[in-house]
Amino acid sequence: MEPILVASQISKQFPGVRALDAVDFELLPGEVHALVGENGAGKSTLIKIFAGLLQPTDGRILLRGQPVHFDSPLQSQAAGISVITQEFNLVPQLTVAENIFLGREVIGPGGLLDRRAIRARSSQVLQELGLNVPAGQRVEYLGVGDKQLVEIAKALSREFHIIIMDEPTAALNAAEVERLFEIISNLRQRGIAVLYVSHRLNEIFRIADRVTVLRDGKRVGTRPIKELTEREVITLMLGRTLEEQAISHQAAAGEQVPALSVRDLRVPGSLHGISFDLHYGEVLGCAGLIGSGRSELMRALFGIAPRSGGEVRINGEPAQLRSADEAMRHGIFLLPEDRKVEGIFPDLTVLENLVINARHGAGRLANLFLHLDAERQEYAQVRGSLAIRARAPSQGISALSGGNQQKVLLGRALVTQSRILLLNEPTRGVDVGTKVEIYQLIRRLAQEGRAVLVSSSDVPELVHISDRCMVLSAGQLTALLEGAWITEDAVVAAAVGHTT
């Protein structure tokens, strides 16, 4: 079978960085080809070249045997390539239908927009996806999972021959993931080629035909997935054998008074009476499907989601937590769920992103120049402690990989010396090696006496790192598991509302 897409000796040079180094890649019609590698390995750069967002420094691309060069995304799309990215490219104020047909609106008689035709065609695409969302619904009112499926609907509404999916399941629950896999299976049967990028190796082994591994901008191997094991893929990604991380599940230690005590916490439309204690020295996991109330719980504890009732105590004393400022004054740190939107300041440097909370909390802006040397020392210490890969403190944070951006955000907790850490999806969108580093950091933070609450959609992750794990379902606490009782089966059962 002749490849539909061939990339030969693709290189991309940025100032001081060779992001891709003579990479070869091919994609067959009707195949699901996985692209894996650590953050910074070159995956995003290669995808952006296929999408027309970047142009290669060297090499060439053949599409159906003919040389092509994409100077813009429109040229790539016109050639039959669709890219579904991690970040949503949706207009919140427009409807689902208007987003699906954005840029190629149906024009009716008199040159007016034919909204009826747009809704009808959008409804057909949504029905094929099994997405139960009205085509006339405004996107801003959709949940994260439904927004991701609308992105997929945009791609499937056109006749593309190649669909590139970049971490498509990052925001989907289990049912939505299954629906996506059914869609991918249908695409394969129709002869559409899928380039699938994901850090979740279990997904790759389930749906991929072949896998290409990138490391440090180079292709280190392309193999049929049936010839590999997960450990072999990880070894190719890291260039070394990944040691098993033995993380013991210990009973909470430290002060007898809980760091954080929550009783009958209620958030309108989300939480219906949640009670738990978080101790210094422990990692408390929080599991639950999309819509379970996990994110709302974290936001309420940080003072940025309205509470309709309940009591919160910190070190045994009542705390109102009516704002983020008040939460920070009580020593609470929040790692947000979406680092791109709520976490990093994309126009600031690595150093500025690291110390911005400390500057605010300590009132240091008025005497900023007196503190620059101290901040640089803090940066050097945190950079070494967290293994942040950045050229200099003055480097823009947007130039870092997703995993290193996440480390910078975690570094804020160290700089502010917060003792209660609320970590929302701490490893979303990071590679296997960085995940292990973040797991080790979370455990170290707890061992140093901090109280850590980890909310995650990754059940194996919570099983791996939690001393105890609470499970939410439909805004209620359905299980609180400890030690050996923290298993994937037990968490999943409780997450769907099953109690014993």
Image (cartoon, helix red, strand yellow):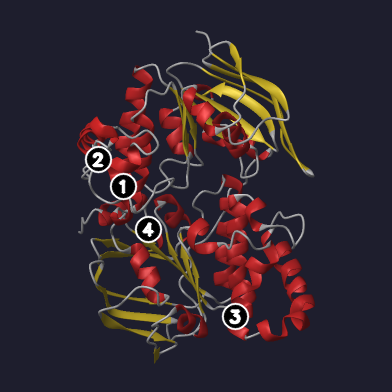
Q: Amino acid at mark 1?
A: Asp
Q: CA distance from mark 3 to mark 2?
A: 43 Å
Residue highlighted by disc 4: 486
Q: Quadrant of residue 129?
A: top left
Mark 1 or mark 3: whose residue is earlier in sequence:
1
Mark 3 or mark 2: whose residue is earlier in sequence:
2
Mark 2 or mark 1: whose residue is earlier in sequence:
2
Q: Amino acid at mark 4?
A: Ile
Name the front one of labels 3 and 4. Answer: 3
Pointer 4 local density, CA inside 10 Å: few below 14, some 14–19, many at least 20: many
Name the residue furthest bottom: 317
SS at mark 2 in the image: loop
Q: CA distance from mark 2 to mark 1?
A: 8 Å
**Looking at the image, which is closer to me, 235 or 160?**
160
Residue highlighted by disc 3: 360
SS at mark 4 in the image: loop
In the rendered image, is residue 429 in sight? Answer: yes
